[in-house]
Amino acid sequence: MNRIGVDVGGTFTDFILEQSGTAGELSTLHVHKVPSTPHDQSEAVVRGVLEICEIGGVKPADIDLVVHGTTVATNITIEYDGAEIGMLTTRGFRDIMHVGRLQRPQNFSLQFGMPWQDKPLVKRRNRLPITERILPPNGAIETALDEDEVRAAVEKLKASGVEAIVICFLFSFLDNRHEKRASEIAKEIMPDAYISCSSDVVNVIREYERFSSTAMNAFVGPRTSFYLQNLEQKLKDSGVVAELRIMQSNGGISTVAACSARPISILLSGPAGGVIGGKWTAALSKENNLISIDIGGTSADISVVTNGELKIKNPRDTYVSGYPVLTPMMDMVTIGAGGGSIAYVDEGGAFRVGPRSAGSDPGPVCYGNGGTEPTVTDANLVLGRLDHDHVLGGDLQLDPELARKAIETKLAKPLGMTVEEAALGIIKLINSNMAMSVRANSVAQGIDPRQYSLVPFGGAGPLHGAALADIIGTKEVIVPPEPGINAALGLLVTDMRYDYGASVIKTLNRTSEDDLKLINAKLSELRDQCYQQFEADGLDPKQQEYAFIAECRYIGQGFELRAEAPEFPLTNDNMNQLLDAFHEVHSREYGRAFKDSDVEVVSVRVIGTAKVPELALSKIDDANGTSIDTAEMFRRNTVFDDGTTVETPRYDRKKLLSGHTVPGPAIIMQHNSTIVVPPGSSAAVTEFGNIHIIKA
């Protein structure tokens, strides 16, 4: 089997090709990088896929699977560059999208904007009321849908030039007949429009979040679906007839068709693969507690994995670019810190780094592509932590004089520093920024970093990993075998995954037989939806596994937490196991549980998973007492965090063997990344090629 993982970053697009034979055979891996093409990500993807096929000696037609992590949907939200949307909603509720929940992100700031008001996903003039009404709790129809109003509204939206229509009726999660009929009418009048119904996108309670999520789905939908389908066709035209799968925000992969219909499911597609790759890497060293940090050219993605379990965000926290989006997302934070982050002196005279980035065009000054503002990469080059003639194995030649001149002109002279002091300031500032974000997602949430390993990856991750671990206080650093393409590798160890939810509000401590029947009927319906999706994908039922989730809260609370049901169906006999699971989750999140309080289920969810073939890596050769001197390449002066300059050996990672220990200071080099081992630390190589950096 031949599989390719493709991860698009802000500066480079990363590729990994796995070649494996029959079951049980070890895999052969090939890695590759090409510059990203922000104007059209598919150009770099197709180019890189063909090039890595050539590197691996594989014909494009012999590729069996391509798994892709993309930032197309994410970029649309960041740039606020989505579709013009029209909305049909229940009469009297057109302003839910504006009012929201009457909450301000910063209550006492008159200047702080609210995205849903300053940059609405649907302009008010395009939110049109429709006469209809369904009532809780059972979805009884009080007022029938006025189909003539629907037709008139769609005609008006068509005349105004909208590209997409969202249909959001008040209680459609109880009965979606009105939304379905309105959708049929809209398709008759505007067959080419991108149409989303809230009952298809997010079929749960909370009208504001449901409306916002559906609007976001349509906002990113036309461009995202075009990109995915266009990429699929371009690959086929290039001879790659393999299935194309897309990474989702929930840590699973899905099909082009499913992601085109629900593009909000891939808003965190890009960084999700990295977390899974980090988890897989740590497992090679039998570590289940890790803090992963993916540092690329423009951003750093941070996530915490405890006991080998990926954490899914609570519904109250699932915001994208300031808009609530009710879709399962891995709990991660992205900050503007990467190799391309720009260092500058602000108007008040303060020394700052990021979040602005030089990206891939023009890139850091040392690239020689016209950049003029110094970046983190320029600082690492000036400090000798990067070698101008060995980046990407020498494929990328850097100009240290351009970097020195930019730092001197923009920073050193204005601040009265030497060039080296200014460069070291850049590194310390960017590390401090990243460390604060790591602490906010670990220490501030009750996690003790001393019990965790830091797993840095991305092109710049291993350059900063040891310094970050020292600031944060993790027990060690684990550098993956191929850190620069670890996110792409993560795509190859990600399972197929579908996640469907529905609202059903019942008190679990006092469930009647009718209540249990209703809950189990919902779970069964959701399981059938997963099964039908897997069947459409052509997956054998033997590959499928299902998890049943209850999203619960104590009565009186505003939001819920996810608790896994012990088994299906739910009965009075196993209900206590579900209640205990919720109490445990609540205690973990908030420090205590209230076991005597009544627990209310708000929504139920079914997660269907289909396992992908395991990635079986071969062990690297054992050192058997051989010296690390065989891996030494040369020595050059390097400036470390204490300001001292040391003649530092460079080691070829490919020549380091299992059992080797490299004393710091040292620089370990490979094609897709560079590892800094500071003075007072050592780097030990494990049997699968992980490098553990431990402070003496």
Image (spheres, rainbow, N blue to C red):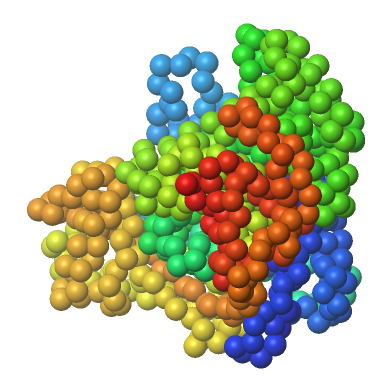
Q: Position of residue 690 (x, y in %)?
A: 58, 63
Tally the numbered discs.
0
Foreground residue, 296 or 586? 296
What residue lies at 69% left-to-right and 21% top-to-bottom? Answer: 422
On the question of residue 584 being in view, the answer is yes
Task: Pick out the residue farthest to the left.
Answer: 596
| Residue 508 placement, left or right of 214 | left
| Residue 223 placement, left or right of 615 | right
| Residue 201 placement, left or right of 173 | right
Q: Position of residue 380 (x, y in %)?
A: 72, 36
Q: Is residue 485 above or below residue 359?
A: below
What residue lies at 61% left-to-right and 55% top-to-bottom? Answer: 662
Foreground residue, 9 or 23? 23
Quadrant location of residue 496? bottom right
What residue lies at 63% left-to-right and 78% top-to-bottom? Answer: 618
Instruction: Name the image quarter holding the N terminus.
Output: bottom right
What residue lies at 33% left-to-right and 74% top-to-bottom? Answer: 521
Foreground residue, 391 or 198? 391
| Residue 404 placement, left or right of 569 | right
Q: Position of residue 112 (x, y in %)?
A: 51, 20
Q: Position of residue 206 (x, y in %)?
A: 39, 47
On the question of residue 82 being in view, the answer is no
Task: Pick out the residue farthest to the bottom.
Answer: 22
